[in-house]
Each structure stands twice: as C-alpha cells, then as structure tokens.
Amino acid sequence: MTMSRATEDMHNDIVLPVTTRRGQTMLDLSGQQLSALPESIGQLIALEALDVDENQLTALPEGIGQLTQLKTLSVYGNQLTALPASLGQLTRLTALSVGKNHLASLPESLWQLTNLHTFNVSDNHVSSLSKHLGNLTHLRMLDVGHNALTCLPESIGNLRRLTFLYVSHNALTALPRSFEHLSSLLYLNITDNQLASLPEYIGNLTDLIELRLYNNRLSSLPAALSHLSQLKELHVMHNRLVSLPASIGHLTSLKKLSVQGNRLTALPESLGNLACLTDLDVRNNQLTALPESLGQLRNLRYLDLRANKLVALPASIEALTNLEKLDVRWNKLSALPEWLQRLEQRGCTVFV
C-alpha cells in the first residue's frame, strides 16, 4: 500500500487518507467510530473504492453521488436509516454493501446501478424489493437475508447470471414463478422463512451445488429435486417432512444430507444410490426402521440416528468401511448388535 494523497476537512478535522492498493484508488475508514462523513468527500472524484464499515454513521452525504469513478462502496455495520438518492449516480459500482444497518426501504435510484456484480442489503428492515431489481442483470451475488420480506418480485428471474442468492430469515411463503430462470445459481439459501412447499421448477436450477431450506414449513420435497445432478449439500432440517421422495436417489453428487428435526417415519431404499454421501443426519425424526441399502454408502463417514424410534439396525451398516462416527442414542433398540464392537475396533466412534 502506498500513500498517494491526504485530504483534510477543516470543519470536521478529519483526515481522509486516500491510498492506492493493487492499482485502485481507495479510502478505508472502517472501524473509526465515525458518526458522519464530511460533504467534502464528494471532492475525491478519482476514488474507486470506499470502505466505511463498522462505524456509527446515521446518514451518507448527498455529495457521495459525485464519486462517479467508484467501483466498490461498503457501509456495512452502521446505523443508516436511509440511503441518498444520489447513490444512483454511481453507475460504475460493481460491489455495494449496505448490510447490518436500519434500512426500511431502498431508493428507486438504486436500480440504476446496472453494473453491480455484488449487492448486500442483509440485516436490515426491508419489507419489499422493487420490481426494478430485475434491472441488475450483471448481479452474481445478492444477499437480502435477515430482513422483513414477504415476497420476491417476479423480476428476480431476470438475474440470469446470479450464482449466490441469500434470502434467509425473512417471511417468504412462496417463490415467484420466474425463479426457474435462475439457472446459474450455485448456492441458494432460503432458510428461516415460512415456505410450506417447494415448486417443481426448483429442478430447473441444475447448476446448484448447495441448497439450504431448513427452518421452514415444508411437508414434502418435489420429485423434480432429482434433476439437481450437481448438488453436493442438501439441508432441510427442522421442517415438517413426513417422507423423502424416492427420486432423491438420483442426487449422485450429494455429499451431505441433513434432514434432522422432521417427521420422517421411513427412508427410501434409493438412498443407497448416493455413492458420494459422506454425512447423513436423520436425528430427531420418527424412524422405526432403516433400509438395508444404507450399507451401499461406502463413502459415508458420519451417520447420526439419534432420537428416533429404531428397534433394530440393519446389519449392512457394518459394511461402511469409511464410517468414522455412528450415533444411535435415544432410540428403542431391543439389543445391541455384535458388529457395533467390530466398528469400534476398526476406529469408528460409536455412541449408544
């Protein structure tokens, strides 16, 4: 890092150390306990990156709109209640973070920032998103988690380049039909909402690697989930699932499956087709038996069966030569099979 320029605002007696890092002109004022930024900040017209994270800012000056060379703006972790309309003039912005503030709404001018690749508005009080969200067609990452959203605009389907989407901890009851067009998504987090069902068109998101749906109200999973051939992690714990679709066996790339805290009474035989599975967590369900096909999961390392209603364990579990931990506590096992000892002898931790 080299010092290239310093500007002093005489009124506020604040030194603004503008530096050059990796060829980019930037100003880092993060963690300085600032309660305001001087209007003169708008004079730094060559600035390309501004970081004022973790301060005590309650507002941004309108003059910030004069920083038309700005590519990165981060004001995460402040006390902002509104954003200036002049932000819409920062049309070169590729990354904008306004998370962890007190924002209840976003200015319409924001949707003019069509070069944005990353937009973080998490941990605020935003209750709706404009239909013009769909203007941000270059977005790769969108984080609107921990807000008060009850729905997503149909225009979200225009974000065809989106790879990471976080909408956790809102009040969503459904997903818009246009969701099926988000075929570039790699990571989708919709946890802690009020979804009662998942649409079949979730199967169109064929590039998904990780899907997080826990803490919703799902009573079933769509058969089309089987189309997610790249999926490596599926987290659906703490819902109301009474069964898993047989088609789950088509998720042959799956490594982690977490379904704890549901109402499952059985697991499909097709589970044995998940040859890449390393972690299976089915604790706190109502399982009375397990399929013999579990013994086909030769890459399984962790198997958590706690707090079910199992009276016996399939002998095929002994064939899981890579198993590192087996937990069968709080079941109704009538007797402990001899092979549990053999598992322990080869180094597997067994809790009974």
Image: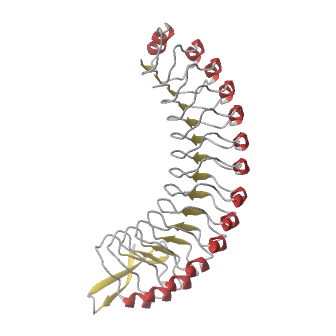
Find residue 311 and report its horizontal and vertical position in percent: 51, 14
Q: Residue at left 59%, top 62%?
A: 151
Find residue 215 and report its horizontal and vertical position in percent: 50, 45
Q: Residue at left 64%, top 74%?
A: 132
Q: Quadrant of residue 1?
A: bottom left
Left or right of 351 in this view: 305: right
Left or right of 346 in this view: 139: right
Compared with 311, 169 (above or below) is: below
206 or 15, which lies in front?
206
Q: Quadrant of residue 157?
A: bottom right
User: Is the image coloured rainbow, by chain, by secondary structure, or in one colour?
Assistant: secondary structure
Q: Residue at left 53%, top 30%?
A: 282
| Quadrant in the picture for the C terminus | top left
Residue 44 visible to the viewer: no
Find residue 93 and report its horizontal and vertical position in percent: 55, 77
Compared with 5, 252 (above or below) is: above
Left or right of 143 in this view: 206: right
Left or right of 23 in this view: 183: right
Label total for image: 0
297 or 331, which lies in front?
331
Residue 37 visible to the viewer: yes
